[in-house]
Amino acid sequence: MIQVILPVIIVLLLFLFHKTFDPLLASLIHEDDLNELIHEDSQKYLLKRIRKSKIALIPLCLWSKLDYSFTFLFLILLIFIFLLKKDYWILKQNVKRKSRLLKFQFPIWLRQLQILLQSNTVAQSLRLSLDHAPTLIQNDLKKLIDEIDQDALNITPYLNFLSAYRLSEIERAMKLLYRYNTVGKDDAYLQFNRMIQTTTKWLRSEREEHHKDAMAIYEWFSMIPLFGVTLLFLAIMCEVVMNMFMNGM
C-alpha cells in the first residue's frame, strides 16, 4: 500500500513544504547572468518560476499506476525542466534581440547628442535628446538625467547606463561623456569624435552581420526544393528496390 501512495506523498510534500524545498531548488538552478537580465530580485523571480513549473509534477501521483515506468518519470522531469527554464530562455532571447537593436540605435542617438553638445552642457544635451531618443533607451536615459541632476560629479550613473546589455562601446562612450562633463572639454571632445567614428564602424559591422544572417535564412529556404527532390529520389529508389525484391521472390 505504501508503494502505491508514495508518489502522492512526495508530490504533497513538495507543495505543502514549498518554503523549504523551493529555496533549495532555487540555489541549485540559479543562472549566473540572471541578476543582469532582470530588474527585480532574482531569488523571488526563481521562486515564482519554480511554483509555476511544479504543476508538471502533479501527474507523478499516477506513477504507481504505470508500474513505476522510468520513461514516464523521465518525461515528467523533462516537462518540469522545460517549464522551469522556458521563461529564462525567453528573457535571454529578448535581451539578445534588444542588444542587436541597440547596436543600431545607440550610434544614431550618439550623433544627435554630439550636435547638442556644441551649444549645451551634458545634462542639458541629455534632456533635449530625450524626446527623440530611441524607445529602447528612454527609461535608462530618464534615470541617468535624474541621477546627474542629483550628483553631477558621480561617475556611477554613467557606468550604469544600459549596463544590462554589457556592450563595451556604450561603456566607453559614457566614460568619455563623463570626462566631457567634468574635465577638459577640448580634449574630451576630440576623443568623443573618435568614439563616434568607432561606433559608426560598429553600426556598419552590425548591418553587415544582419545582412549575412538574412542571406543565410534565404539560403536555407533555397535548400528546401533540393531537399524535396532528394526525398523524392530516395522514395523512388526505395520503390524500385522493393519492386526488384518482389519480382525476385
Image: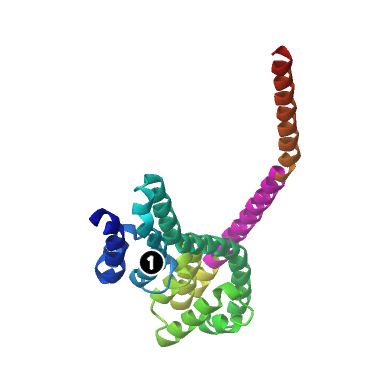
* Residue stretch rendered in magenta on the structure: 191-220
- Which SS type dominates the magenta stretch? helix
State left or right for residue 241 relative to residue 13: right
Query: Residue sitting at 60 percent across and 80 percent down?
Result: 129
Q: Say few, some or many: other residues with alpha carbon within 10 Å of mark 1 (under 14 / 14 to 19 / 20 or more).
A: some
Query: Residue sitting at 74 percent across and 15 percent down?
Result: 247
Q: In this view, does 151 lie above or below 241?
A: below
Return the residue at label 1.
35
State left or right for residue 125 relative to residue 144: right
Q: In this view, does 31 lie above or below 225?
A: below
**Quadrant of the rendering where the C terminus is positioned:** top right
Instruction: Kindly identify the amino acid type of the residue bearing the numbered disc 1.
Output: Asn
Q: Is mark 1 on a helix, strand or loop?
A: helix
Among the 4 quarters of the image, the one containing residue 97: bottom right
Query: Residue sitting at 60 percent across and 75 percent down?
Result: 135
Q: In this view, does 248 lie above or below 197?
A: above
Considering every residue shown, the one lying at the far front of the view is: 1
- Percent of width and height locating residue 158: 44, 73
